[in-house]
Image (cartoon, helix red, strand yellow):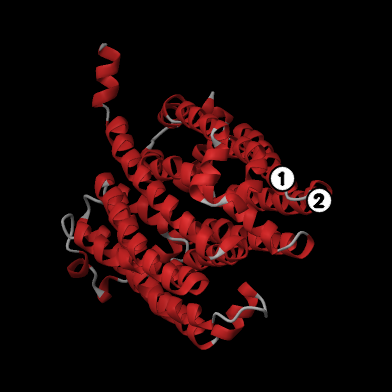
């Protein structure tokens, strides 16, 4: 009984509980959005949405210069030193706004080029990239503000920002998808994240008056140099990663057809729902803890609190997901998508291995192990790409989820050996 009381009162339990409610909300919103996509755009539209999502992930990393994890780390470390905090916030804010405006210009004036690269010659959605150009600066600043909140340790506010943003995004998505079908889905995807700006400003201003804190004279190139290692890490994973998945999806379209690519995107979408719990709690709670861990013993404590508290719950959750997969597909999508149920086993195996390795991967960011991270990511992405191409040619669409499981099996072994001292 005393043990249960101790768990109940712990900060991790409180944050995990609030985070769980947020994730349940996001999954609920995802169910509605997925059903809308299934009914109004079908498997082919789902594949186009997947291509755009991969592109947006890469664009997000480029436009934020990969600074997000670095912002969390440095704000967490120096939040009591107002002068140093002002320098970091001013430098990063000015840099991100300049980059975002430049990228917006490239997107707007070369919309036709990006349309051909992402959607091919059979689809004309240049207006999507023009809408993205207008939304990008607002979204970039909102990501900066959320990273600052995270670094300040305001976990609850971060969760509230994301929850409110998801609800607003759902309302916009419903209107656009019902009214404009595939075009509406694509426009909703690029525009709704920008609405996070207004929510994040409201919550951050309760902690710190951010726009009074930012001063042009506080800009410091030395801070950019410090954060550059995070840029390298983020650009490798968040730019190359989505591009690899884009190439894999295009290979599936060429060899198996666009509907098959849509089924894989559907499986990826379902996977993203249940992975939200882990990825959010890692970013909001565990990354700041790893950043301030002073020695191997403290790092080991953080690692094992994840393995004992989060991983078993996740394994139980995906086991339930596997046995209810037919119900899930029918609920989220339509009868047309039942082929997706055959992809669950290897996807879930890969996701368990992925979650087991994620906490170790965050140590790269927490301790700025730039070269090690880049080597690990390049090897992982290479395995993903080549094994997917090879296995798809043998097993069809099953091959892409088998490659997913193989990649994270090898990645977990490699990263476990690398961080063995912090683990054991």
Q: Can I make out residue 140 in this image? A: no
Q: Describe the element under mark 2 as helix, strand or loop.
A: helix
Q: Classify residue 299 by image quadrant.
A: top left
Question: Image height check: is 365 above or below 140?
Answer: above
Image point (31%, 50%), residue name: 150
Q: Quadrant of the N terminus?
A: top left
Q: Residue 262 location, x and y as percent?
A: 63, 58
Q: Secondary structure at mark 1?
A: helix
> Within 10 angstroms of label 1, few (less than 14), some, or many (20 or more) residues?
many
Seen from this angle, which residue lies furthest right?
394
Residue on which disc 1 sits: 403
> Does residue 381 appear in the picture of this structure?
yes
Q: Nearer the viewer, residue 213 or 36?
A: 36
The C terminus appears in which quarter of the rendering?
top right
Tell me: residue 259, above or below residue 319.
Answer: below
The picture places residue 214, in percent across and down from the top left corner, at 24, 69
Q: CA distance from mark 1 to mark 2?
A: 9 Å
Tag 2 residue: 390
Question: Is disc 1 in contact with disc 2, using a CB cutoff of under 8 Å?
Answer: yes
**In which quarter of the view is residue 135 placed?**
bottom left
């Amino acid at each position: 009984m005393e043990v249960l009381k101790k768990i109940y009162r712990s900060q991790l339990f409180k944050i995990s509980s609030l985070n769980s409610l947020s994730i349940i909300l996001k999954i609920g919103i995802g169910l509605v959005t997925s059903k809308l996509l299934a009914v109004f755009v079908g498997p082919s539209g789902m594949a186009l949405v997947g291509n755009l999502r991969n592109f947006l992930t890469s664009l997000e990393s480029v436009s934020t210069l990969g600074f997000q994890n670095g912002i969390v780390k440095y704000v967490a470390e120096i939040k009591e030193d107002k002068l140093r905090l002002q320098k970091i916030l001013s430098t990063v804010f000015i840099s991100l706004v300049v980059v975002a405006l430049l990228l917006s210009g490239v997107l707007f004036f070369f919309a036709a080029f990006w349309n051909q690269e992402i959607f091919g010659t059979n689809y004309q959605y240049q207006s999507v990239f023009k809408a993205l150009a207008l939304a990008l600066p607002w979204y970039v600043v909102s990501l900066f503000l959320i990273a600052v909140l995270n670094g300040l340790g305001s976990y609850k506010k971060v969760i509230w920002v994301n929850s409110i943003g998801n609800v607003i995004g759902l309302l916009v998505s419903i209107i656009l998808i019902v009214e404009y079908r595939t075009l509406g889905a694509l426009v909703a995807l690029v525009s709704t994240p920008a609405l996070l700006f207004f929510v994040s400003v409201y919550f951050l201003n309760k902690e710190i008056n951010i726009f009074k804190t930012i001063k042009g004279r506080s800009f410091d190139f030395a801070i950019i140099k410090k954060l550059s290692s995070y840029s390298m890490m983020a650009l490798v994973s968040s730019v190359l990663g989505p591009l690899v998945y884009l190439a894999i999806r295009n290979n599936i379209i060429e060899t198996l057809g666009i509907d098959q690519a849509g089924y894989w995107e559907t499986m990826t979408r379902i996977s993203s729902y249940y992975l939200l719990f882990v990825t959010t709690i890692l970013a909001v709670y565990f990354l700041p803890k790893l950043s301030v861990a002073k020695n191997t013993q403290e790092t080991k404590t953080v690692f094992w609190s994840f393995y004992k508290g989060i991983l078993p719950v996740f394994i139980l959750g995906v086991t339930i997901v596997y046995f209810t997969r037919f119900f899930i597909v029918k609920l989220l999508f339509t009868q047309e998508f039942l082929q997706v149920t055959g992809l669950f086993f290897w996807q879930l195996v890969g996701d368990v291995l992925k979650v087991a390795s994620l906490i170790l991967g965050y140590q790269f960011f927490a301790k700025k192990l730039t070269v090690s991270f880049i080597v690990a990511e390049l090897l992982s992405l290479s395995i993903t790409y080549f094994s997917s191409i090879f296995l798809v040619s043998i097993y069809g669409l099953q091959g892409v989820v088998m490659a997913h499981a193989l990649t994270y099996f090898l990645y977990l072994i490699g990263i476990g050996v690398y961080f063995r001292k912090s683990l054991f």
